[in-house]
Image: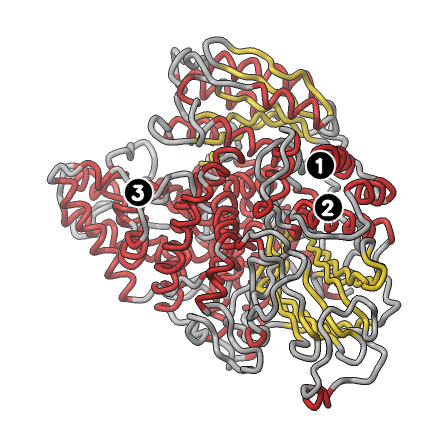
Amino acid sequence: MGRVQLGMKMEPSDASLVVLAQAGDARAFGTLVARHYDMVFRLGWRMLGDRAEAEDLAQDVCASLPGKLSGFRAEARFSTWLHRVVVNAARDRVRRHASHARAAQGWGEVELARRAEDAQAADGQAWLIQAMTALPPELRETVALVLGEDLTHAQAADVLEVSEGTISWRMSETRRRLREIAEEERA
Amino acid sequence: MTDDPLDQLQAALKRQTPAPSDTARDAALRAAAENFSAQSQGSADLVRQTPNRPETRAGIWTGVLTMLSNLTQPRVLMGTSALATLAIAVVLTQNFGDYGQTGVVPVSEEVVGQQSRGVAAPAPALTDELAESARVDALEDLRNENQPLRQNGAERLRSLDDGRTRGAAEQTENRGAQGQVDRAESKVSEFILGPNEVLQTGPELSAEPMFTAPPEPVFIAPESDTEAYPDATPNPLKVTADKPVSTFSIDVDTASYALIRQSLNNGVLPPRQAVRIEEMVNYFDYNYPAPDGAEVPFRTSVSVAPTPWNEDTQLLHIGIQGYDIAPADRPPLNLVFLIDTSGSMNDPKKLPLLIQSFKLLLSTLSEDDSVAIVTYAGSAGMALEPTPATESAKILQSLERLSAGGSTAGQQGLQQAYALAAQMSDEGEVSRVILATDGDFNVGISDPEALKDYIAEQRDSGTYLSVLGFGRGNYDDATLQSLAQNGNGTAAYIDTLAEAQKVLVEDVAGSLFPIAGDVKIQIEFNPAQISEYRLIGHETRTLNREDFNNDAVDAGEIGAGHQVTALYEITPKGSAAERVSDLRYGQATEAAADPSEEYAFLKLRYKRPGEARSQLIETPVAPDRQDIAATETGFAAAIAGFGMLLRGEALPGWSYGDARALAAGSRGEDAFGYRSEVLSLMRIAGAID
């Protein structure tokens, strides 16, 4: 995520904003949330595949941050912690709020319509939908972090609180499944 | 583009991810700021949001959702989905009579068009999406409201009247709020249980395939309904010339069967209005031909077979088999259920739901899997030694014996569970401890950190931990979440059976994806061949004829490996069974009748997941069509006849004994003993009727 660390004229770091926010500084908190909103939405979309769902998710996450922030300990990176919050919220959403059916249905419906005029893009979209829906949830979220957010396996492991080896395995499993899909298509 | 599919996926993910809209962004930032200042002012309630727990909804679930959920009564926090859905299904049945009379449902069959019911044009705009999720939310609340009815059979029965009233009121309200009852119904399909997910045994409810039937305008009183059960109106006989088309959405439910079983096992005939034949029929798995591949995600099989109880009619048996994405080539699974039986679990939303949930899970296991149960309360103890999953009777028995009392010795229980899991695990097998608790994990944990470490250690040795939270009150999300995370498992909150279905069946036993959505079936009977027909059961669900081609009208989903069964009793032209005589002056309208041999033409619409446009599959039904094995059609017919008898329908010359003989002769393989079980129910019914 390459956030610029605290410097004289630089943007304040996440860590310093968190400290200020935890002390009750609303502006620091606002800056922090604004800075990360796009990531929250993006990650949400990549896990849920639906714009409206992702926007709802992002809003819920943002709205819950004031409460959750007090539980944040400086030993973790804020972004890692926030990734985890988003992942958990998305999991909950898939399980509880949007049923798997809706979530899977949502995967791309909106986008599909938006890009209907662009055949090539729609092709890519269809493929993405197919690929993402074919992945089980744990692979999907791993993909969203590693491929979508460019986290290293170690960072993703941190977020998902599994071992690095698990992430590596999941990524190779994802590759295997994608190949299977490709083969089925050729067949 | 490289060969590596991961690169391709990454490129696609990045390219396709939309930018967030400014409105949504602003709203979110505003919500964050508001909560921040609220919290600074010490409004702790508002802040303690774990954003997606149900109880937080009132606080932070913003906008429409809150508004809509407030429209409904205070929720009984039993949950969403199947349980509740079952409730509404029942309530709808109960009200069917009123429903028809008020003229709400019937829409003229002749009106063919894009008229959708309460659903706006399918514009994928954000607002619609929001409205949709709000709608679903409201519906969930509606289901929640009916939840207690479903809690257990007996209680449910007692409160049936009450529930009916409430249900009716809510239907009205909901209809007003555009939460269209039929949408509620079609949402039921989210909870389809697959063929291997039959919630068997035990007096509980189960959720299983059922169909939706069109409550088309009731035009004839069913002669067979000799007793005054206004709510138990069987699907009326239809005259093909008047109504050649029957349309319904795929739907799932099996509550009725569980209720019937419970009632009969208690030596009492179930109340007639509690008997829903389609739920009984769909409780069972049938051996249907599998689809060829994922391209067309399911296969429709049709057989025409003699009607056991009427030699002058025939049964049209429709079986739909979903494509099984993940065939069970997974390694054997060893599950240790670690069940919190402490005093705080003594709540209908906790232990009983937990037991039902585990039954659900149990039904998805295969012969190679095994199960053990450890309980913990004051002290930990093994309630069930490791037992093959096929010995369902034994496992269920020990589940039934569980009762709550004492305080919580969580750590001790956990250690025992792990020890058992280690003992059960062979090379190449997967072991998992499933901890079910309300989070009252306080007694016996001297050192939470040590416990986490212990779990992590076990994880590394190959045994994972999944944590299922039940109930509220002292539900300790943080502890459970962290336990599960350390165990490489998931923590899930289970408030309903449907939630259990999702979590246990999909997450634990394998992933489950819908393979087709909005599945609607329309059958057009050929008046030249079939003079009358009736859909057996399915009284509670409907689609209007015009809804079939309207992609905006929601209908049921089919998940991987799921199947659905529907039966029509059809009367061939000229048969002695014709009940309605031809009209002297009505014949001119029949001019369009197809003189061909075909009995009917079956049309099935579905959407692939994520697609907005539906696909169409058409199947002509010739009189000799036989896609389905005779054991399967025979068994389904036996169950249907059994249900009709239980409903008090007159089947001259046909008795429970005949049903039993037919079922016994059609048992087939019956690996899990479901079919055998019904034989004893038939015997009991015959004895007490």
Mark 3: amino acid: Thr
Q: Indicate which label's residue lies in the foreground, 3 or 2.
A: 2
- Quadrant (top left, top right, bottom left, bottom right) of the C terminus of chain B: top right
Mark 2, Cα crowd under 10 Å, few <14 / some 14-19 / many 20+, is: many
Q: Nearer the viewer, residue B60 or B184?
A: B184
Q: Position of residue A2 (x, y in %)?
A: 35, 50
Mark 1: amino acid: Ala
Residues at marks 1 and 2, CA–CA distance in whole angstroms: 9 Å
Q: Earlier in the sequence, mark 1 or mark 2?
A: 2
Q: Position of residue B309 (x, y in %)?
A: 80, 54
In the image, residue B686 above or below residue A176: above
- Quadrant (top left, top right, bottom left, bottom right) of the N terminus of chain B: bottom right
Left or right: B602 as drawn, with respect to B477: right
Residue at image position (67%, 38%) is B364
Residue at image position (26%, 37%) is B48
Q: Earlier in the sequence, mark 3 or mark 1?
A: 3
The answer to whether mark 3 and mark 1 are in CB contact below 8 A is: no
Q: Secondary structure at mark 3?
A: helix
Residues at marks 3 and 1, CA–CA distance in whole angstroms: 47 Å
Residue at image position (44%, 17%) is B342
For the image, the number of numbered tags is 3
Left or right: B201 as drawn, with respect to A100: right
The answer to whether mark 1 and mark 2 are in CB contact below 8 A is: yes
- Judging by the rendered image, the residue that carries numbered circle 2 is B642
In the image, residue B296 above or below residue B255: below
Q: Quadrant of residue A69?
A: top left
- Judging by the rendered image, the residue that carries numbered circle 1 is B685
Q: Earlier in the sequence, mark 3 or mark 2?
A: 3
Q: Which mark is residue B56?
A: 3
Q: Residue furthest left?
A: B41
In the image, residue A54 above or below residue B247: above
